[in-house]
Image (cartoon, grey):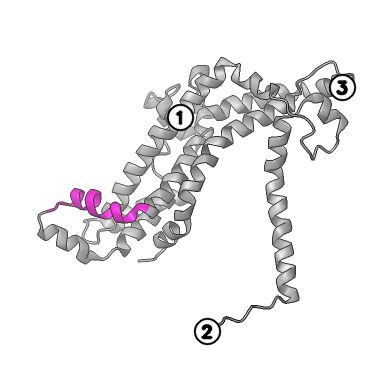
Amino acid sequence: MKHKKRSWTGGDVALNIFFVILSLITLYPFYYVVIESFSNAVANAQHVPYLLPYVFDTTGYESVFGDSAFYQALLVSLFVTLVGTAVNMALSVTGAYVLSKKHLAGRNFFLTLILFTMLFSGGLVPTYLNIKNLHLINNIWCMILPSAISTYYLIIMKNYFVSLPPTMEEAAKIDGANSFTILVRIVLPISKPFIATFFLFYAVERWNEWYNAVLYISQKSLQPLQIYLREMLTSMSSQLAAQAQAAMAQTTKVLASTVQMACIVITMVPILCVYPFVQKHFVKGVMIGGIKE
């Protein structure tokens, strides 16, 4: 049976044009960052606005990669991302699985306490004093432990585990499996899309970690990549005007903004490399977790 070709209406054309324009507007900032990271002061001064890659200059990247502080900050960010994400997933998954059991004594009480933290917090000063008393000031764990569990993600995970058929676990218990074995060998293998989704959510948050570092880290060797980038952007902002004027006379090659854009591209690359492998799980994983009890 032949399918009739769908005819395009004026509304369809207008919507497609609108979304194409919206996509271009969304992608342009990324495009601009990339092409300017490979630019130089002369090209930026001669072409305003800078829309096309008129030159290919890697001096900005050479300036970043030539700084030893960059590699130290990169190692710190990698540690926080890898270890922090592992801690996030271990605590969130086990906590959500336990809270999904209706026979858990005091389950509603614990859920109320957890939900309370979504509405109220101790405040900045009490939190800082707590971190200080735990001897986490200038400690790399201050970027991992205070944000070890996201309440929002925990609730979604709990709702997902509640949605699983109880007969599956009952059959495993008949075969002698305990709760930990059921979680590791049965629940997690069938929950790969869901787990992959929240693994990426946590990984992105840990990679972009900067707030706790600003508050609790003053030692240069423990500052993550985001703080390194922030300090570089701040320190180079004062150079923009002077270097732009010098570029007009072609007396300098590197523009401060070129180095800034190179830093931004470098910090984006790891996450962009991971996204394609996990993106296919997003809709399925989040929608499953959104099922209400």
Whether residue 202 is visible, yes or no, is: yes
Q: Mark 1 falls on what kind of element?
A: helix
Amino acid carrying label 2: it is Met
- Distance, label 3 to label 2, CA atoms, is 70 Å
Which residue is under mark 3?
245
- Residue closest to the far front: 1
Q: Which sits in the foreground, 12 or 169?
A: 12
Provide the residue span drawn in magenta: 177-192
Instruction: Please tell me whether the stretch drawn in magenta is mainly helix, strand or loop.
Output: helix
Q: Which sits in the foreground, 216 or 161?
A: 161
Which residue is under mark 2?
1
Relative to 97, say whether 229 is above or below.
above
Q: How many marks overall?
A: 3
> Disc 2 or disc 1, which is closer to the eye?
2
Question: Do the residues bearing badges 3 and 2 touch, measured as CB atoms within 8 Å?
Answer: no
What number is the disc on residue 78? 1
Amino acid carrying label 1: it is Leu
